[in-house]
Image: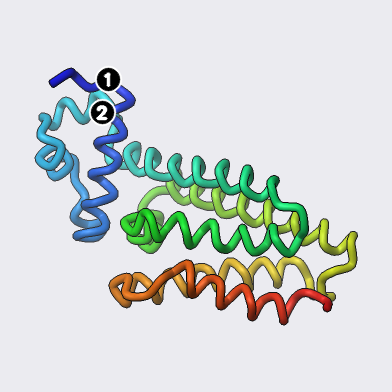
Amino acid sequence: MSRLNTEQRQNMIIDEAIRIIHNGGYQSLSIREIATKVKISEPAIYRHFLNKEDIILGILNRMMDFDHLLEKDILKQKTTQDKIRHFILFHFDFLEKKKEMTSVLFAEEMFDQSDILRQRLIFIMQKRKNLLNTILQESRVNGGIVEIDNKDLISLILGLIRMIVLEWKLSNFTFSLTERGKSIIKMLDKLIFIK
């Protein structure tokens, strides 16, 4: 078996950290536990990451990779309505394929303990808000959306995504997140778009 390069090993460590958080919560994440699961020594973990916080930053960087993919997907859409639909469905599709990430998203204690992690999460959230705001502004120019403050619409859309993902997680992933998303989109179409 060939040796893993640095990037492969870092990805392996991040993957395992996500699984540990998913299976036991943030409190069960430790360098020792990661080392045991990855089958390397604790000092070897420190050759790749400074500490546990640095590993969590690696996880958050994956969320930022998600944002790049989301933006690319949005740019392919022609209408504002399609952009909003894809914004919502892209979240659900991604999480349906990577259920473990839901545990990271809802591990709020992780962000309470570190200003660096909190700031990175706020940055990620702001990026998504900005993307959604750009889409809504475009719709305002074209006159296809109801007269509701963009901040309120952004809160409505992101809040719906978060609530549905939480319901899905708490149900132990028993329903199709994507199908539920399609149902929500139909409701949003009626609420926010002018026919």
Is mark 2 in CB contact (under 8 Å) with mark 1?
A: yes
Q: Residue at x 72, y 81 (%)?
A: 190
Which corner quadrant of the image does residue 166 belong to?
A: bottom left
* Nearer to the camera, 184 or 33: 184
Percent across and percent down for residue 164 are 47, 74
* Nearer to the camera, 19 or 96: 96
**Placement of 39 over or under 143, stated as above or below:** above
**Placement of 129 over or under 40, stated as above or below:** below
Q: Is residue 119 left or right of residue 146?
A: left
Check disc 2 and give the amino acid type. Answer: Arg
Q: Which residue is mark 1?
A: 5
> Do we see residue 109 in this rendering?
no
Q: Quadrant of the N terminus?
A: top left
Percent across and percent down for residue 101 are 36, 55
Q: Residue at x 43, y 42 (%)?
A: 62
Task: Say the numbered circle drawn on residue 9.
Answer: 2
Q: Is residue 191 left or right of residue 138?
A: left
Q: Secondary structure at mark 1?
A: loop
Percent across and percent down for residue 80 are 76, 60
Q: Residue at x 68, y 52 (%)?
A: 131
Percent across and percent down for residue 66 are 50, 46
Q: Quadrant of the C terminus?
A: bottom right
Query: Within 10 Å of the Cα at label 2, are there few (<14), some (14-19), or many (20+) other Cα atoms?
Result: some
> Do we see residue 28 in this rendering?
yes
* Distance from Cα at disc 2 to Cα at disc 1: 6 Å
Q: Is residue 35 left or right of residue 128?
A: left
Q: Secondary structure at mark 2?
A: helix
**Placement of 169 over or under 47, stated as above or below:** below
Check disc 1 and give the amino acid type. Answer: Asn
**Placement of 119 over or under 191, stated as above or below:** above
Task: Say the numbered circle drawn on residue 129.
Answer: none
Q: Is residue 56 left or right of residue 62?
A: left
